[in-house]
Amino acid sequence: MHDAVRDAFPELADLADADLADRVAQVWADGLAASDFETLEAVPFSPKYAEDIGDVRLVDHTRDVTRWATTLADTAVSLQDVDLDRDIVLAGAVLHDVSKLHEYSAYADGMFGDQVPHPYYGVHMVAAADLPTHLQHIVVSHSGSTPVKPTTIEAKLVEYGDLLAVHGLFWNTAEKLFPND
């Protein structure tokens, strides 16, 4: 299953820290094994909005967020010499929605995402894997569904990457979904 994760997220090969890459892949592998999905590619991004955005898969969204976040990180370093840990940005982007393996599994009740926002379960998964607090912070703070705000540049970049990826999906339907925005 570990190889399937690396195939789904080839960006893991870009991590300078090979042990971190293995541990991030293991979080996804463990989550997949505990879910009722047979493959990562089967996991939807957001069934709630499928009618509006189409059949977007979680792997595709995660890879989009990873590309956005790492591009932003590389640009921040290039333009302003921002001191950041690119491995933490990349690993955090890959992990940011790992909890959706649980959220969208049949055994999770339909209220999971509403009553327990997905970042909370995600931070549990990352903490259980004994990954660094920096990564736990990225997972719990990447979404406005928790009151936790990003307090590191790495977390802010993943938050922005997620926002850009999500807004891109909804751009053509934004007027219909958010008529007063």
Image (cartoon, rainbow, N blue to C red):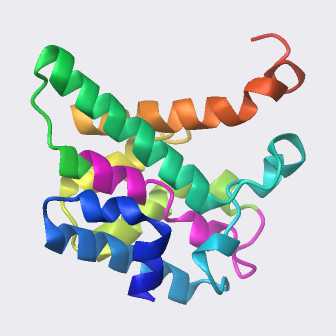
The picture places residue 15, in percent across and down from the top left corner, at 21, 59
Indicate the quadrant where residue 56 lies: bottom right
In this rendering, the count of numbered labels is: 0
Instruction: Give the camera-side residue of 179 and 43.
Output: 43
The picture places residue 169, in percent across and down from the top left corner, at 70, 36
The picture places residue 82, in percent across and down from the top left corner, at 13, 24
Indicate the quadrant where residue 167 lies: top right
Indicate the quadrant where residue 164 lies: top right
Q: Which residues are magenta?
A: 89-110
- Residue furthest top as drawn: 180
Q: Does the magenta run of residues contain 102?
A: yes
- Res. 148 visible in picture: no
- Res. 176 visible in picture: yes
Up-down relation of residue 166 to residue 13 (above or below): above
Q: Quadrant of the C terminus?
A: top right
Left or right, 74 with respect to 70, comes to left
Q: Quadrant of the N terminus?
A: bottom left
Q: Residue at the location (78% across, 65% down)? A: 110
Up-down relation of residue 54 to residue 78 (above or below): below
Q: Residue at the location (23% across, 23% down)? A: 76
Left or right, 112 with respect to 100, comes to right
Q: Residue at the location (75% across, 79% down)? A: 106
Q: Does the magenta run of residues contain 151?
A: no
The picture places residue 113, in percent across and down from the top left corner, at 66, 56
